[in-house]
Image: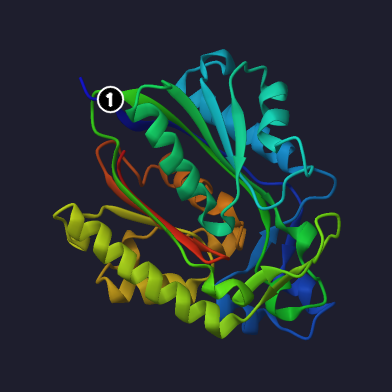
Amino acid sequence: MKKFARIIGTGSYLPPKIVTNFDLEKTLDTTDEWITSRTGIKERRIVTNESTCDLALEACLNALSMAELEPQDIDLIILSTTTPDKIFPATATILQNRLGASCPAFDIQAVCAGFVFALNTAQQYIENESATNILVVGSETMSKIVDWNDRSTAILFADGAGAVVLSADKNTGIKHSKLYSDGNYLSSLHVNNNRINELGTIEMEGNEVFKIAVNKLSDLAEETLKECNMTSENVDWMIPHQANIRIISAVAKRINLPMEKIILTVEKHGNTSAASIPLALDIGIRDGRIKKGDTLLFEGIGGGFSWGSALVEF
């Protein structure tokens, strides 16, 4: 009997320190009104001394609790992060040790599309019966690679973690997923370091990124739904990467999806890169909006560019 990859638990974690737009007014040539109108962001969470693994650990424990599983029940850990704690070993192996799990663990890096790439990878392990329960995690400390004097990026990025437990099931879970990458856009969004042992900061061509993101994500959503013989009317909730409200609303308009059917956390979370989709998913489930049987559309795009989608029955 064919096995499907189904989400049976979610968890998230945000560091306690809040940085508001009014805080940024004190150090940048900006205002709360300017930031809010262009991004939809009011505040973001920033680590003080927490690591990427620290955030991931809390999110995973919450996801395991919802799934009613122990760390020993996990067959694989896939951690998507742009901000690993070390060049090596993989942050996923540090996480595995701290959880007390005894399974393979590895990192994936696809920036803001990272969670969708990790979810797709986990799906393959389950569908070919190489694993039964997989922790898929997005965890980021983006504040460590932000130039806090750069108004165009300092207002956007933030820290946090989200996790899901993906489990083999006879019932449909992930219906469809698609991944893309195109290295022609490398200079539009990148970290400006030249060597592996040199810590750089994020550089972004904002207008170019906006155009690329809206076009790629709109086309991807339409393609994903068409291949499943569905339309936007069949989607209960879209859970996009929380880049900024202008990108999200432009994509929604293109695919004729009401904003009321989108889980939004960007106002309180900012852009948490690979963590943003699982963070929003967990919040939508725990506050009761997302219910069993709902059809969910995940979409993310990140530097590279890399972008991907997943159509999921929860």
**Which residue: 33% across, 64% down?**
220
Please, what is the three-letter code of the amino acid marked with disc 1? Lys
Position above or below: 23 against 144: below
In this figure, which residue is indicated by the disc labeled 1? 3
The part of the image, by quadrant, that contains residue 209 is bottom right
Residue 267 vertical position relative to residue 55 in the rendered view, above or below: below
- Decide: is 260 above or below 164: below
Q: Quadrant of the N terminus?
A: top left
Say which element carries label 1: loop
Looking at the image, which residue is at 56% across and 54% down?
110
Q: Position of residue 249 (x, y in %)?
A: 40, 73
Question: Furthest residue to the left?
Answer: 229
Q: Is residue 165 left or right of residue 34?
A: left
* Point 74% across, 47% down: residue: 16
Work out whether residue 134 or residue 181 is closer to the camera in this orientation and state it. Answer: 181
| Image coords of residue 198 (percent x, y) | 86, 60
Question: Which image quadrant: the C terminus?
Answer: top left
Q: Residue at x 85, y 77 (%)?
A: 27
Task: Tell me which colouring the rendered structure shows.
Answer: rainbow
